[in-house]
Image (spheres, grey):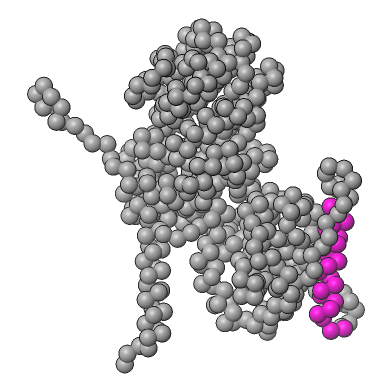
């Protein structure tokens, strides 16, 4: 299997690449992203390409002629890109990689990063949707994820290729740039006092295991990837000995500016989570990857508060302190 | 004056619970329910009402079941049935059909409420919960069972959950309630791979008839304007 991994510079991409590099079924492994991965991945060739620069991306696809694509080049707004840049990169990478690979004719399977944001959280919507619930996104990120899914499924149908769209709960990990993770680690955590809905997360390690399992199994269709259980935002703050600050409505505009200044911007899909919650039924995925059931949302949130802040090393004349 | 050991123990347990909750160490499920809060409020509801439950043994000890509840106004009945089943059958039931509007939605979700959508009911049943769906209230004829949308009953067939008719009779003013759980309703036979709309409509009718039968058995004969 010749595998092309997009978004390999992120934490999830690197973890997936490490698992694939150790897989004897993978003969060639090529990764691309706008950032290099943090740490070397044996047996992987890396190409530094900004997804908005479509021509080098098309050249890479033609060169590799992949039989499998792991498309993790989906950029969450306010994670490492601004909302506008995130959408541009996501759209450009999806069109170029999936379109060109399908035209080459060697493609056998696709695994795609999506998110629970596609289900939307409109009034009266199903609180814990399974894969059979039709997606009706109500945030910009949710709409962009659904658009990517549509493109991928259309590509898959044209070429008779199975496409697995993994709808991840908000991803959290020690080095994962997540707007939710940043918010929950603030000393004062704002939450909706009128709703304080439950949300679920998934650990980046479990998400990587799910990607590789879906690739090996040749899953076709959407698959929710979510840790069991849920917590509320105020509960998550209390678990980390943070001060939960209940807000009623108009003061959110000011709080969004303050949290952005504190390094934790609140994009629209995170605001939706804070007001309407975000959970899903992950029973199908837990059959595929039983290990996901072992780490609950409460465990992951407790771990999140246990992760130490980045340590700044002081350079001393000629050597690292 | 010193407190008795029982009172001291209760105060100690309450302090430990508060301390644990202040540290965020309590359970909230994916639908937003707080089981500890429900268990705290059931005895409180029991102190102000008298709920007698008949047929609690028909409720499965574990696993999913769909309870179709006949209601007059539909306001107190879900709470009465939840409290009655918690005490008589030892199970926490969920009730579907809450308004998805803050802040009432938050309060009702904490108590076990969920929106009345087929997908929501299906999710709860697949997770092994007891789920209450209420018949529409018959305002003019309080002793007549209302109707239920077939789509709300359909998820029980997919989850392999028994469908039980339940009648909740009594009044908020008297504080006396009687909850009767009936025999499970037989699922319709399938001629093809899927249940037809007609079969689902007949199942909803059977659920309504099951509730009506329980109301008729439990109610003394009355004037015709009550719907008898």
Question: Left or right: where does residue B12 sit relative to residue B172?
Answer: left
- Asked if A93 appears above or below B76 in the picture, the reply is above
Judge by depth and name the residue closer to the eye, B61 or A220.
B61
Residue B211 in magenta stretch: yes
Question: In this view of the protein, can residue B133 be seen by the observer?
Answer: no
Question: Left or right: where does residue B55 sit relative to residue A126?
Answer: right
Magenta residues (range): B200-221
Residue A204's image quarter?
A: top left
Question: Residue at 50% across / 51% down in the picture?
Answer: A230
Judge by depth and name the residue closer to the eye, A291 or A115.
A291
Give the image location of residue B207, x and y in percent. Answer: 82, 63
- Asked if B144 appears above or below A218 in the picture, the reply is below
Residue B11 in magenta stretch: no
Question: Left or right: where does residue A175 sit relative to residue A153?
Answer: left
Image quadrant where one finds the N terminus of chain A: top right
List the single residue furthest toward the bottom.
Answer: B1
Question: Residue at 52% across / 29% down in the picture?
Answer: A212
Give the image location of residue A190, x and y in percent. Answer: 40, 50
Give the image location of residue A177, x and y in percent. Answer: 39, 34
Magenta: predominant secondary structure element? helix
Image quadrant where one finds the C terminus of chain A: top left
- Asked if B121 appears above or below B74 in the picture, the reply is above
Question: Residue at 61% across / 12% down in the picture?
Answer: A106
């Amino acid at each position: 299997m010749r595998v092309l991994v997009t978004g390999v510079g992120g934490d999830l991409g690197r973890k997936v690449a490490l698992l694939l590099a150790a897989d004897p079924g993978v003969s060639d492994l090529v990764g691309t992203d706008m950032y290099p991965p943090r740490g070397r991945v044996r047996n992987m060739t890396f190409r530094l390409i900004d997804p908005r620069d479509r021509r080098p991306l098309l050249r890479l696809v033609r060169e590799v002629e992949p039989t499998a694509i792991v498309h993790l080049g989906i950029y969450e707004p306010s994670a490492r890109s601004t909302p506008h840049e995130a959408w541009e990169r996501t759209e450009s990478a999806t069109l170029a990689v999936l379109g060109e690979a399908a035209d080459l004719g060697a493609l056998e399977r696709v695994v795609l990063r999506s998110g629970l944001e596609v289900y939307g959280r409109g009034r009266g919507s199903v609180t814990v949707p399974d894969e059979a619930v039709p997606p009706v996104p109500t945030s910009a990120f949710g709409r962009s994820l659904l658009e990517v899914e549509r493109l991928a499924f259309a590509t898959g149908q044209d070429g008779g290729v199975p496409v697995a769209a993994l709808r991840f709960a908000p991803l959290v990990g020690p080095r994962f740039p997540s707007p939710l993770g940043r918010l929950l680690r603030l000393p004062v955590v704002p939450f909706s006092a009128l709703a304080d809905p439950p949300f679920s997360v998934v650990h980046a390690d479990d998400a990587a295991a799910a990607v590789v399992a879906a690739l090996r199994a040749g899953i076709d269709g959407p698959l929710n990837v979510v840790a069991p259980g849920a917590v509320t935002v105020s509960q998550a703050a209390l678990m980390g000995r943070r001060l939960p600050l209940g807000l009623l409505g108009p003061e959110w505009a000011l709080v969004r500016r303050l949290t952005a200044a504190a390094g934790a911007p609140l994009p629209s899909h995170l605001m939706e989570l804070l007001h309407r919650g975000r959970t899903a039924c992950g029973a199908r995925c837990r059959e595929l990857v039983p290990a996901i059931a072992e780490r609950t949302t409460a465990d992951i949130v407790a771990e999140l508060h246990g992760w130490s802040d980045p340590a700044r090393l002081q350079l001393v004349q000629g050597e690292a302190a | 004056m010193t407190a008795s050991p029982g009172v001291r123990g209760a105060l100690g347990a309450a302090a430990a619970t508060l301390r644990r909750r202040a540290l965020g160490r309590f359970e909230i499920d994916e639908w937003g329910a707080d089981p500890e809060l429900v268990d705290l409020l059931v005895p409180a509801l029991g102190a102000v009402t008298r709920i007698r439950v008949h047929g609690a043994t028909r409720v499965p000890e574990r696993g999913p079941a769909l309870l179709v509840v006949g209601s007059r106004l539909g306001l107190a009945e879900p709470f009465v049935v939840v409290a009655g089943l918690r005490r008589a059958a030892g199970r926490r039931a969920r009730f579907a059909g809450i308004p998805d509007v803050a802040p009432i939605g938050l309060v009702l979700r904490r108590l076990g409420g969920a929106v009345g959508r087929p997908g929501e009911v299906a999710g709860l049943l697949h997770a092994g919960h007891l789920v209450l769906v209420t018949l529409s209230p018959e305002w003019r004829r309080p002793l007549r069972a209302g109707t239920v949308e077939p789509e709300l009953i359909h998820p029980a067939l997919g989850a392999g959950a028994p469908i039980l008719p339940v009648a909740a009779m009594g009044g908020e003013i008297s504080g006396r309630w009687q909850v009767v759980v009936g025999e499970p309703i037989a699922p319709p036979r399938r001629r093809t791979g899927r249940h037809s709309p007609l079969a689902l409509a007949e199942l909803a009718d059977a659920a309504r008839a099951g509730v009506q039968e329980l109301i008729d058995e439990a109610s003394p004969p009355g004037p015709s304007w009550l719907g008898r």
